[in-house]
Structures are given as C-alpha cells and as structure tokens.
Amino acid sequence: MRAAFEVYFGPMQVKDPEIFSLLEKIGHHYRTNIANRFTRHALSTMSIEGNGWALIEEMTEKVANYRYQGYHLDELYMQILAMARFVYQSRRQVAPNLRLLAGAGHGQRVTEADRVFRDMAVNNFDSNLKLLSDMVNDLYTKVAALDREDAGVKPTVFSRIPELKEIGRYLVD
C-alpha cells in the first residue's frame, strides 16, 4: 500500500514533533547568536553557493509553514546541507575576521551597551557556531533515522543525495 501511495503522492512527509522542535531551536539559536545585528554584516560578506541563503532562511525562519503538511525529506536534507555549508564557510571566512568585520562602522555612534553586546557576540561566535553545528548534526542524524525507517528495503532519500556524504566534514571543526 505504501509503495502505491508514493507512486501517486510522492514520499511520506516528515511531521515528527521532535524534528520540528529541533528546527525551531536551530532557528532561534541562529537568529539570536549567529546572525544577529552585530554579526549580520560580517556574514553578508560570506559566499554561499547556489540558493544556500534561501535554504538557510527556510530552515531558520519558516518552520511554521511546514507544520501542517510536513517536510519532504529531500527538501529538509537540502536545508540541512545548506546550513552545514554555512557552518563550514563561517569558520573559514567569518570567524577569523569577525572582530574587524563586526566593528566596521555602520556610520553610527555605538553606545556602551551596544559595544558590550557586540563584544559578547564576537567573543562567543565560535562557541555559538559549535552549538549550531551540534544541533544541525543532531537534526541530520534524526532525519536520517526516520528516512531509514521509512525506506525499509528501498534506497533511502539521503543515499540519492551524494553531497550529504560531506556533512561530517562540514560540521566537524
């Protein structure tokens, strides 16, 4: 019955509450600790290939849009892959120069409170990036387990996306 369903309606969609909870946690952490007002300018200097920024936005900003119908595994994997590439590129392109890039003026006078918050964002960027990496890895592991369970004897969706073999390299420091 499931095979007939997939022929007519496509693969099953992920609606697991644990996955949604983790996606919300990732989005909150990303917006608050990674792409905040003190680091956004530095992140904008980063080159992310293809539609990576759009996929990151989908993952971090639009979880509610998927609550009713769920995620297709392939689109969720692409979001995970985009975020893993983001982590990798952030470590190489942004983290080493973040203090300089975050201090680059916005043409405004910086209040003492803003200076303290900016310094906190800069000083904690590496550890916050590590937390993001761990959460994305946890998400990938859980999604892959659901994929294996759903696939049964058929090939998994992740086995059809060769770039996912690079996830470990992207996420490990």
Image: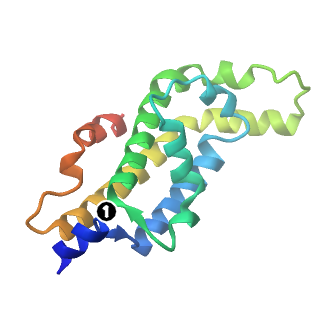
Of the 4 image quadrants, the one containing the C terminus is top left
For numbered disc 1, what is the local secondary structure?
helix
- Above or below residue 33? Residue 7 is below
Q: How many numbered discs? A: 1
Residue lying at the far left of the rendered structure:
153
Q: In percent of the image, x 27 and y 37: which residue is there? A: 163
Residue lying at the far bottom of the rendered structure:
1
- Above or below residue 47? Residue 134 is below
The image quarter in which residue 65 lies: bottom right
Q: Nearer the viewer, residue 156 or 110?
A: 156
The image quarter in which residue 123 lies: top right
The image quarter in which residue 46 lies: top right
Q: In percent of the image, x 37 and y 61: which residue is there? A: 72
- Above or below residue 93? Residue 73 is below
Tag 1 residue: 142
Residue lying at the far front of the rendered structure:
8
Left or right relative to 71: residue 166: left
Q: Position of residue 60 (x, y in %)?
A: 56, 52
Q: Position of residue 134 (x, y in %)?
A: 40, 49
Residue 130 visible in rendering: yes
Q: Position of residue 143 (x, y in %)?
A: 31, 61
Identify the colour scheme used: rainbow
Q: Position of residue 135 (x, y in %)?
A: 43, 53
Q: Residues within 10 Å of mark 1 (few under 14, many from 20)?
A: some
Residue 39 visible in rendering: no
Of the 4 image quadrants, the one containing the N terminus is bottom left
Left or right relative to 159: residue 71: right
Instruction: Please state which amino acid type lies under the numbered disc 1.
Output: Lys
Left or right relative to 44: residue 168: left
Q: Nearer the viewer, residue 108 or 120?
A: 108
